[in-house]
Image (tube, helix red, strand yellow):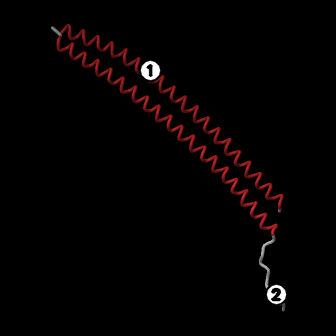
Amino acid sequence: MSKTPLNYELPTEVRDFAEKSVEQARKAFDGFLGAANKAVSAAETQAHTVQSNTKEMTTKAMSFAEQNVSAAFELAQKLVRAKDMQEILQHQSEYLKSQAASIQAQLQEFGQAVQSNLQKVASEAQSTMQKAAEDTQEAIKGVQKAASEATKRK
């Protein structure tokens, strides 16, 4: 039996291969991480848009409510000042006609705003999804390239 110590040292080629493989894996991971960060950023932008649109819709709804309450108080003042039942009925009739037209216009305006906001959100969502898919495909290509290069070195 020989008393020479066993050599456990890895050959330089194996260490180089392992080092390059780890480097390529890191690059691939960084690519996926970059794609994920872009997707999160896009989602945050989209959430901000939705929040902004919601604030706009809330402001519009409050404005309509103020208009309607103001019209109701005007009616109340007219009713208090009315001299007879005929004048009361006339004021109520005018108020109902006016409010019906006002509410119809408000609903139409609100509906158009909702539709416009939904179209904006849908467009942004489609753009975000398309960009995320492109970024993911680029990351996958990077992984495939790294795997191909690692396979060639074996």
15 relative position to 74: left or right: right
Q: In the displayed structure, would residue 147 be above or below residue 41?
A: below
Q: Nearer the viewer, residue 141 or 8?
A: 8
Q: How far from the left and from the top, in percent, is residue 147?
A: 77, 56
| Amino acid type, callout 1 | Glu
Q: Residue at x 72, y 61 (%)?
A: 22
- Label 1: which residue? 109
Q: Residue at x 75, y 64 (%)?
A: 18
Q: Residue at x 29, y 22 (%)?
A: 69
Q: Residue at x 66, y 42 (%)?
A: 133
Could you tell which of marks 1 and 2 lies nearer the N-terminus? Answer: 2
- Label 2: which residue? 4
Label disc, if present, on residue 61 of the rendered structure: none
Q: How far from the left and from the top, in percent, is residue 76?
A: 22, 17
Q: How far from the left and from the top, in percent, is residue 19?
A: 74, 63
Q: Are marks 1 and 2 in contact (CB under 8 Å)?
A: no
| Amino acid type, callout 2 | Thr
